[in-house]
Amino acid sequence: MNKNKKIIFSIATIVGILGVAALATFTYKSDYFEGNLFRLIRQTNTIQKIEPVNIKKVPVKPKKETTIDRLKPDFSIPKIEIPELTIEQKLKIANVHVINLPSNDPSRSTYTGNVDMGQFITKFYQSYEDDFDMLFVFGYDTDDAHGRGNGVSDGFFIKDVPANLGKVDYCGTSLGLNCDTYPEKLKYIQQLPFWNYTYDTFPTFSFLHEVGHYWGVGWHQAGNDQCYTNLGMAWVNQLLENGHWTERFQAGNTSTLTYQTNFLEARDPNNPLPESTVWQGGWLDNGNGTFTKNGIFLDARREGLKFNNVDLYAMGLMSAAEISQTPMFLVLNPQELSKNPATAIATYSGTRMNLTLDDIQNLLHARGTCEGIGPNYYYTGNGDRDLQGRLEFSNNIHIGIVLIQYPDNPVTESHAYHLCKIVNEEVVNQWNNATLGRSEINVALSTNTQNPDCEALFPGPAANYTPITEIGGENQDNDNESTNNDDVLELLR
């Protein structure tokens, strides 16, 4: 029995020791190790008088925390590198479509370097819908490196001109002779070299001049002077010059489609006038057999020049009844009496011949006889302007502007800025001015380019630009250009 008691006691002792060890281990590993363990030790000391055990505190490594909850949302937008626009892309925003054609492009003439008109039309309408009444081409070439042209040639395109005023249909390009094969809305293509011109210089005036030719005044050929004289219409030879008015014709205004008098003198040796008549301006009848010409220098804008009443009638912007309310006259055989180069004012003697719209219509009728082109070419019926069922468009014209350039001679940033100003500001405003506020032109290539900001597109040239009037006034500018008048005037032919 004693033996059994000893065995039972031993087992109980072992179980007790194991329990104490388990309890110590549990409290050591737990978060309340320090407080509970030493409270247990104090209780044990009170009962058994046992000295406290010196237990070394072991630091507990914190659990590794996930960083997912600590992540802050990143609202920053990564920077995107926006490529800088090319000059051609900027010009497109500025309503100038650029066509780059190398010298060996098949559409260029081998001999002149100019672009075939038919292929030009094809190239343009690969990028745009048939929504333009006219196309106007600037041929860009700032130097003589190519020694050739850079415009549109090898054809001519004009259609739907009102009857009795011009060529109704004349479509002769590589696309064919039938105008029906061309874009339906397109009626006319014209052009002008851009060379070294800058804003406030000649292209603005020339643009108006060339667009105005759609309606006239190609009603006279210089080689037929004698025929008009034989018909008792010698005045015709002083009214018109090679598809232009002479400045001697006054019909409300001196027309922007006017040639200076000295052009006429080149074929009229019996009536010479000094070269000073390269001035262009209005002639005032003094009522005593003399006329005062308030000239306008060959400056850039020529804001005093507008379309005359016959031009406006041809455009459909003035009625025949309204024309009859404004006197029209031609100064025959003028002779210079005095001049003031500083003011561009001169006085002439001459004979006044009053004209009416009937006289202009009779001129067109006579052309069929004098130039052998047939009575129905310009003049039919009673001679009134006749749309022949076509829609009027001259009060709101949509014109597409195109720049043709050699890729190895690209337009400069400065010239691009000036072209932007010419197209979107000068041309638009001056057209409205020249038509007496009766017509507007729209040069937008798309709905997204209605009002381009030239200064934002070309900040460098814009910052350095000084208008000519601020540099030295109009007279200084005219003096600078006077040495190149022959080249300038040739553009009007």
Image (tube, rainbow, N blue to C red):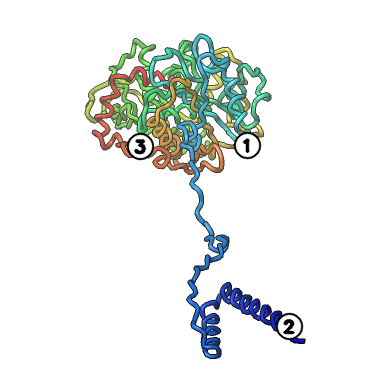
Sequence-earlier tag: 1 or 2? 2
At label 2, the amino acid type is: Ile
Residue 417 location (% of width, % of height): 40, 34
- Identity of the residue drawn at 45% across and 20% down: 408
Q: Nearer the viewer, residue 408 or 4?
A: 4
At label 3, the amino acid type is: Gly
| Circle on res. 460 | 3
Compute the Cα span from label 3 to label 1. Answer: 44 Å
**In the displayed structure image, the side of residue 247 where residue 43 appears, left or right:** right
Q: How many marks?
A: 3
Residue named by callout 2: 8
Residue 254 location (% of width, % of height): 39, 30
Compute the Cα span from label 3 to label 2. Answer: 107 Å
Residue 205 location (% of width, % of height): 40, 30
Residue 100 location (% of width, % of height): 51, 23
**In the displayed structure image, the side of residue 439 where residue 333 appears, left or right:** left
Compute the Cα span from label 1 to label 2. Answer: 126 Å
